[in-house]
Image (tube, rainbow, N blue to C red):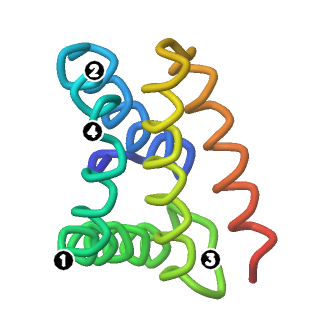
């Protein structure tokens, strides 16, 4: 995502790399599906999410500063919702087993880039 030259590429690449990893590794996805609640609890109760939020927010601020992402009133909220959405999509992948990753990523671009344009 750091090589992205547009906001669309940034969001698409962020989601695609995350979701594609799990889609390519059914053993890991199966493990997550059988241990969903303990894994979610461990992630959210520990400090793992703090680093993820911080790095994403830093990247978003850099993209905005370079004029590559729409300026938004709160990059922290944007980072939180982007990460939360990724976790929920992963959860749905464990339940539904197969999603169209490209369609999902295209929708995330519309949601987050379009939303950022309106959240000033």
Q: What distance separates the C-alpha of mark 1 from that of mark 4?
A: 19 Å
- Percent x, y for residue 115? 74, 62
Distance from label 3 to label 4 (Cα)? Answer: 38 Å
Counting residues from the start of the chain, the first of labels 4 and 2 encountered is 2
Q: Is residue 58 above or below residue 23?
A: below
| Camera-nearest label, 4 or 2 | 4
Instruction: Find the distance from the CA under tag 4 to the CA under tag 2.
Output: 9 Å
Mark 1 touching mark 4, by CB under 8 A? no
Nearer-the-camera pick, 34 or 80: 34
Mark positioned earlier in the residue sequence (2 or 1): 2
Disc 3 element: loop
Residue ID at (19%, 74%):
46
Q: Earlier in the sequence, mark 3 or mark 4?
A: 4
The residue under label 4 is 35
The percent position of residue 42, horizontal first and vertical second, equals 22, 63
Query: Do the residues bearing badges 4 and 2 touch, measured as CB atoms within 8 Å?
Result: no
In space, the residues marked 2 and 1 are separated at their CA atoms by 24 Å
Nearest the eye: 22 or 70: 22
Which sits earlier in the primary sequence, circle 1 or circle 4?
Answer: 4
Assess disc 3: are there few (<14), some (14-19) or many (≥20) residues with their C-alpha within 10 Å of its C-alpha: some
- Label 3, label 1: how far apart the Cα atoms are: 28 Å
Q: Disc 2 designates what residue?
A: 30
Q: Which residue is mark 3?
A: 71
How many other residues sit within 10 Å of disc 2, few (<14), some (14-19) or many (≥20)? some
Find residue 17 and report its horizontal and vertical position in percent: 31, 33
The residue carrying pointer 4 sits among few (fewer than 14), some (14 to 19) or many (20 or more) residues within 10 Å by Cα, namely few
């Amino acid at each position: 995502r750091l090589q992205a030259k547009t906001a669309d590429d940034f969001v698409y690449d962020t989601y695609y790399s995350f979701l594609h990893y799990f889609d390519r590794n059914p053993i890991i996805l199966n493990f997550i599906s059988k241990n969903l609640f303990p894994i979610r609890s461990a992630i959210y109760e520990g400090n793992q999410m703090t680093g993820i939020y911080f790095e994403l927010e830093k990247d978003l601020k850099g993209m905005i500063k370079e004029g590559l992402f729409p300026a938004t009133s709160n990059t922290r909220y944007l980072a939180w919702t982007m990460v939360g959405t990724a976790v929920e999509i992963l959860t749905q992948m464990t339940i539904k087993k197969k999603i169209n990753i490209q369609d999902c990523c295209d929708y995330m671009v519309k949601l987050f880039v379009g939303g950022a344009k309106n959240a000033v």
